[in-house]
Image (cartoon, rainbow, N blue to C red):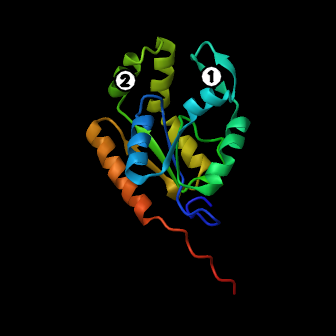
Amino acid sequence: MAGGGEGRRKKPNILITGTPGTGKTTMATALADSTQLRHINIGDLVREKNLHDGWDEEFECHVINEDLVCDELEDAMDEGGNIVDYHGCDFFPERWFDRVVVLQVENSVLFDRLTKRGYSQTKITNNIECEIFGVLLEEAKESYPEQIVVALQSNTIEDVARNVETLSEWVRNWSVPLPVPSS
């Protein structure tokens, strides 16, 4: 289904991923408002439904149970019309997404955002290193067909607005492809 939406879905599914602090939730919320697609914030879902295996003291976050998350999302993803917002992407089934967006920011912008959130120095360093080395873009390219993966800059409000407009247009133009006739 990746990149094509074959099957019964009538609306596309989009994954918005990127290092913490790149603006995933901001962009997903604005895109959901623009397209009327459903925004699913995985961090919130994990907390609300207890889809985790405890707390990681070093990185100050829940250790999500990927199997429980996927089980929880299966029906919604099959239905289509979702914008999934999470900082990882390699555990979701490839068939779920028609577009995978990796948000990227300049290191100084990321540092300021994470500092304002009150992140520990360990967490800030880890996230900036992930951004420097392009870990999430590489993960997306290894997990999904390259033609559905797009990297977008998210340094400013103007970047977010431009990205929302670009993706809204993509959603408007998305259609379920016709089946290939058999010979």
Q: Position of residue 87 (x, y in %)?
A: 53, 34
In this view, 22 is above or below 95: above
The image quarter in which residue 114 lies: top left
Q: Where is residue 109 in the image (x, y as percent from the top left)?
A: 33, 27
- Label 1: which secondary element: strand
Query: Most extreme residue toward the left, as rendered?
Result: 158
Labelled disc at residue 62: 1
The image quarter in which residue 7 lies: bottom right
- For residue 144, side relative to residue 123 (left or right): right
- Label 2: which secondary element: helix
Near-viewer residue (168 or 125): 168
Amino acid type of the residue tagged 1 in the rendering: His
In this view, 43 is above or below 79: above
At x 62%, y 56%, the residue is 79
Q: Position of residue 164 (x, y in %)?
A: 36, 48
Near-viewer residue (176 or 108): 176
In this view, 109 is above or below 115: below
Quadrant where the N terminus sits is bottom right
The image quarter in which residue 161 lies: top left
- For residue 72, side relative to residue 33 (left or right): right
At x 46%, y 43%, the residue is 102
Tell me the CA gap for discs 2 and 1. 20 Å
Near-viewer residue (39 or 17): 39
Amino acid type of the residue tagged 2 in the rendering: Arg
Query: Most extreme residue toward the bottom, as rendered?
Result: 183
In this view, 177 is above or below 63: below
Near-viewer residue (155 or 177): 177
At x 50%, y 68%, the residue is 175
Q: Earlier in the sequence, mark 2 or mark 1?
A: 1
Q: Where is residue 95 in the image (x, y as percent from the top left)?
A: 64, 55
At x 35%, y 32%, the residue is 106
Q: State the residue position of label 2.
A: 113
